[in-house]
Amino acid sequence: MFLLSVNCLKAQENYKQITEGKEVYAGGDSYDVKLFKAKTKGKKPKNVVLMIGDGMGVSHIFAGLTANKGHLYLENFKNIGFIKTHSANNYITDSAAGGTALSCGVKTYNGAIGMNIDTVSVVNIREIAEEKGKSTGVVSTSSITHATPASFIAHQPERTMYEAIAADFLKTDIDVFIGGGLKHFTQRADNRNLAEELEKRGYFVEKDINSIRDIDAEKLAGFTAYEHNGNCSERKDMLQISTSTALNILDKNKKGFFLMIEGSQIDWASHQNNTQYLVSEMLDFDKTIGLVLDFAFRNKETLIIVTADHETGGFAINGGDVATGRIEGAFITGNHTALMVPVFAFGPGAENFSGIMENTDITQKLIDIF
Ligand code: MG
Ligand code: ZN
């Protein structure tokens, strides 16, 4: 018990605690899913949108599909594969090594952000896009300094170095980022006010989702929470609004863009073994996929990759009903598992992303065709 509380304190990640008796989802609202036929211009994408469902395994997706009475936007994707998620030092990855594999294309140790096993910085796919003159963005439903989004920005030896990670945003030329975590920019041990520094560098710094919704800026730093965002029922359509805003800003660049969008809390719901929370986060992520599909369908030069960094919960479905959306969920752990996770690709270049791959292959392939 003592050890457990020390570990929890050390991690300061209270979303990881199991809540008992939340395995069954009774059913609820559903939405209509539109089918898009991929029409592509050329073989290489001008734009890439990488969408990461943190902790999202096949069971999570099927829970979402059942809860939505039989369909998801994900069904638009015809190129499907799997990735092996193990890190350099662990059969079971954390989100830092998993994020770094997807951002930098290298296997590293659990906890590393944008660094290899020797704690040497590795260039990430967003930086490569930036060097090519493309616009770049990152959107997340966690703090923007949390492991997954941080992997596309920062280079730090340990994921909990939130203030150093926040400072790394100032070393980039990123065009738009939206997520929680204002605290790590403004209430810092070094007394720097990074929000003011961002403003001096020409960013619109917005702290309200309604101003993020309406903004037409060249550069945007959007903070949707002081620390983490609330869950889906609390933050409502924050992820869809943020995604639309980011696409509007990024699409102005004739050379194209790279955008990473994270559904962070699929993982947190799974750590908590809470099926209702898991389903609502899964459907929120899928609705956002629908929005990006709608953009890509009209744009024709956008490759969308949807994948996960790892599976969380060892989530399984013991029973349910597509007609009512009921799901009898079960979890074998409050942590991550070693399972392969799916990869879905849509748009020009999508055919490269099928079969069983390493997580690092995603970025290596993107570098080749982007
Ligand atoms: Mg994450
Ligand atoms: Zn996790």
Image: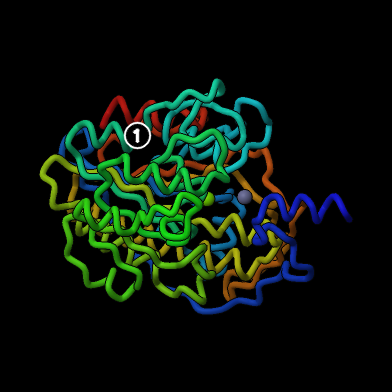
Q: Quadrant of residue 206?
A: bottom left
In which quadrant is the N terminus drawn? Answer: bottom right
State the residue at coordinates (33%, 54%).
177
Scheme of image coloration? rainbow
Residue 272: give x, y in percent of width and height.
Answer: 69, 61
Is residue 180 among the parts visible in the rendering? no
Q: Nearer the viewer, residue 311 or 204?
A: 204
Residue 355: give x, y in percent of width and height.
Answer: 48, 31
Identify the residue at the far front of this view: 191
Residue 179: give x, y in percent of width and height.
Answer: 41, 60
When the figure is inspected, residue 191 is found, relative to residue 96, above or below; the finding is below
Identify the residue at the far top of this view: 118
State the residue at coordinates (35%, 54%).
194
In which quadrant is the C terminus drawn? Answer: top left
Q: Nearer the viewer, residue 209 or 40?
A: 209
Crowding at mark 1 (Cα within 10 Å: few <14, some 14-19, many 20+): many
Q: How many marks?
A: 1
When the figure is inspected, residue 67 is found, relative to residue 200, above or below; the finding is below
Helix, strand or loop at mark 1: helix
State the residue at coordinates (28%, 63%).
205
Residue labelled with disc 1: 125
- Left or right placement of residue 159 versus residue 256 in this view: right
- Left or right placement of residue 74 versus residue 19 in this view: left
Kind of residue indicated by mark 1: Ile
Residue 304: give x, y in percent of width and height.
Answer: 33, 46
Identify the residue at the far right of this view: 1
Q: Quadrant of residue 353?
A: top left
State the residue at coordinates (75%, 67%).
19
- Left or right placement of residue 137 versus residue 5 in this view: left
